[in-house]
Amino acid sequence: MKCRINPKSLRFRVTLTFVAVTAVLFASVLAVNTWFLEGYYRNYKVQVLKDAYEEINAVVQEAAERDQKEMITGEEEDSGGTEVINDPKDGVTVITGDDGNSKRFNMKPPMAGPVLQPEDRGDRDGYEEKKQAGSGDGAEKTQSENGSDSAEKTQSEAGTDSAEKTQSSAADAGSDDDEDDFSIATDPTVAETVRRLRDTSGISIVIYDSLRNETLLTSTADARKLRDRVQRYIIGQYPKDLDVLYEDENYKIQTAFDAFSNTKSLESWGYFTDNGTVFIMAIPLDSIREASGISNSFLMRVGLIVIVVGSILIYLITKRITEPLADLSKLSERMSQLDFTAKYSDRKNAAAEVTTLGKSMNVLSDRLSSTIEELKTANEQLQKDIDEKVKIDELRKEFIANVSHELKTPIALIQGYAEGLVEGMAEDPENRDYYCGVIMDEANKMNKMVRQLLTLTALEFGRERTDFREINLTEVVRGVITANQIRLKEKGLSAEFDGAVPQMVLADEFQIEQVITNYLNNAVNHAEGEKRISIRMERDEMRGVVRTTVFNSGKNIPQEELGKLWQKFYKVDKARTRAYGGSGIGLSIVKAIMDGHHQAYGVTNVSGGVEFWFELKLAEQETPGAE
């Protein structure tokens, strides 16, 4: 069985909505990952570098102050009369012994020195202008040739010159004993801090002593590369694509691109607040792109799995929800086709609202069914009334036309013969008697026809009540034959009837007498050949009826004319009917009487003639109170 998906169904739309929402959600996450994660990561790492600087600087400063105090305490113990003078403005401590000699200790970071803060440091445009003005032929030559060996040589010379100038400045300041200086390399607290930052934050750190031109501490294998880079920064050699993100009094945070390794990193470099210690810290930024790519790939795979599995689950879940709705839809469709036999069957998984709606539709279906049945009955009755009215109108029109036609001929004859009498055309008594006889004969025919029409109209419109009584049909037939004996003899006919057995039936005696009389008159008028008329009765115990048949010898009636015989004023042979004075109403009266008795009647062509018949209910077959 094929599973056909309707794009307009609730299941399909809910599933499609889930797929669209999930796809948009994952696409948004991918977009955020692609466009905003790197910026967030970079800002986060800038803060990490700030925190790292503050942490290392605090440790270095604390260790330097502690070492300085130990040095001052040692000097005081060696010289009994020592005078210590602190100069807060200059940041210098002067110790004077008993011999009058003095030693000066610099307690302020040498930030204003010629090497640690070179002129125009950080202004790379100014530095480029000075280089172009001839401040250093070797550096200019190095930049123009773009040679890595020359750059290293220039950096080495710059570092050596800076170290020599720093040492000269320190000598001028009165620091003539190098062994008294503080060394970060031997301080375990600083080393432990550097190691911890490397392990927890992935920071590559190089601490460089610009006075001695030596690396004090490092947490990376690329210490020389970082030291050379910070030396270039100190003398003002910055790459063109440098982007400074943060700048403080003592340090900067910037992004740098390494052309050799084709990597981008985040760097922090500057000075600690001690005696000229330079540092550089670096965090690679390329890892965030790789992490973002991996994250996007993972999210795409997870998203596809979620969409596929979720769509299947949503489709199955909505199937359980929409099945009762589908039942209601089918029910409403059948109700729209006026089929109220269908009912909603409650489902276990159906929501309470759907169940309530289904029960309401069942009640609505029952009420509509009963209402429509009542309307059908009313419409049928109305249609019957309309049909009856139409029938009455048609009968009235037909009656007027037929009566006009039937009365036209006798009235014309009466008028003609009456005018002849008036004009004296019948002068002798014999002609006058003939004229008067024609007039009387036509008047009798009209009177007979009018009486028949009145009888037929009364029967058709129910104005003549049918009085059912138990009668002896045999005696009624015998009485009709006796009353027509004279006419039968005039026509040279004989009527055969075997009425030895009485047949008791329920009928209106006067109306049944009219039926038998009309059948007998019709037989007399159409009997030919043998000129034989026979009447017989046949009892049908199974059906509880008696069939009375009137036969006359002669020609058969055309088969297509048999059904028309019961219509008013219909005549098979109009010339013959005119000859015997028939009006074409007799058989119509038979039809109306038998319809009032609700019994069968008809005509049949048989060998040698025609049979007209009718049936009546046996009296003993009728239940009591049938009247």
Image (cartoon, helix red, strand yellow):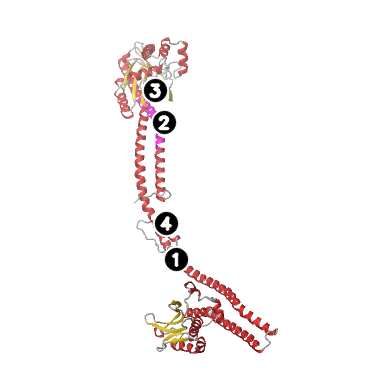
The magenta segment: 28-56
Which amino acid, by three-letter code, is at mark 2?
Gly
Q: Real-space Cα distance between discs 4 and 1?
A: 18 Å
For disc 1, the marked residue is 369
Which amino acid, by three-letter code, is at mark 4?
Ser
Would residue 67 appear left or right of 504 to someone viewing this image? left
Q: Real-space Cα distance between discs 4 and 3?
A: 68 Å
Which amino acid, by three-letter code, is at mark 1?
Ser
Q: Categorize mark 4 by other alpha carbons within 10 Å: few (<14), some (14-19), many (20+).
A: few
Q: Give the percent coordinates (x, y) of residue 581.
A: 56, 81
N-terminal label among 1 and 3: 3
Tag of residue 257: 3
Please identify, in this view, whether the residue under mark 1 or under mark 2 is nearer the observer. 1
N-terminal label among 1 and 2: 2
- What secondary structure do most residues of the magenta stretch adopt? helix
Q: Secondary structure at mark 1?
A: helix
N-terminal label among 2 and 4: 2
For disc 2, the marked residue is 39
Q: Real-space Cα distance between discs 2 and 4?
A: 55 Å
Q: Residue at x 43, y 9 (%)?
A: 137
